[in-house]
Image (tube, grey):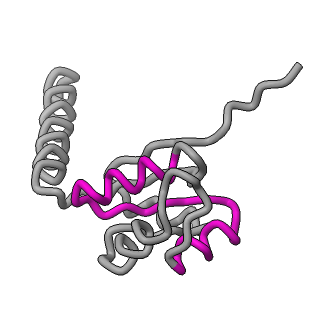
Amino acid sequence: MSSTMVENGVTMVADRAADALRERIASRDAICGVVGLGYVGLPLAVELARAGYRVIGFDVSEAVVANLSAGRSHVQDVSDQTVSELVAAGLLSATTDTTRLGECDAISICVPTPLSK
């Protein structure tokens, strides 16, 4: 097999994967991941869920995950009612299990930038 054929074969596979992802996004079947459920990540997760995507939110804080799973928000701009409705509808879930991110088609990372001297 020549390098051109391998390259074209890889390109064709990548093109098919990209097309499949575009279709999943358009049909709202794509699963979105959000790493970091703070004042940036939680509102992003909520808006994706409101748009009809299933969202898996990951956070290292067990307390944050437990509260969100119980329908309680810790972010001022996101109401408990909104979180509760999205969790009940199965559109928003929260976890501390990194392996759950493997279920996602796309992942947004919303963690603090480590700035220090």
Please indicate whether residue 67 sits to the left or right of residue 47 in the image.
right
Q: Is residue 8 left or right of residue 54?
A: left
- Residue 43, compared with residue 91, is above or below; it is above
State yes or no: residue 64 in magenta. yes
Q: Residue 95: horizontal and vertical position, in percent?
A: 55, 69
Which of the pair 115/43 is nearer the observer?
Answer: 43
Q: Quadrant of residue 89?
A: bottom left
The image quarter containing residue 24 is bottom left
Q: Magenta span has 19?
A: no
Give the extent of the magenta segment: 41-70
Please state the horizontal and vertical placement of residue 12, each as a whole percent of the image.
Answer: 12, 35
Please report the residue visible at 35 percent of the width from the left and 54 percent of the height from the top: 32
Counting the numbered discs, the total is 0
Q: Position of residue 16 (x, y in %)?
A: 12, 42
81 and 49: which is toward the camera: 81
Q: Residue at x 19, y 47 (%)?
A: 21
Q: Dividing the image into 4 quarters, which one contains the C terminus?
A: top right
| Residue at the image position 43 percent from the left and 63 percent from the top | 56
In depth, the one of 39 and 61 nearer the eye is: 39
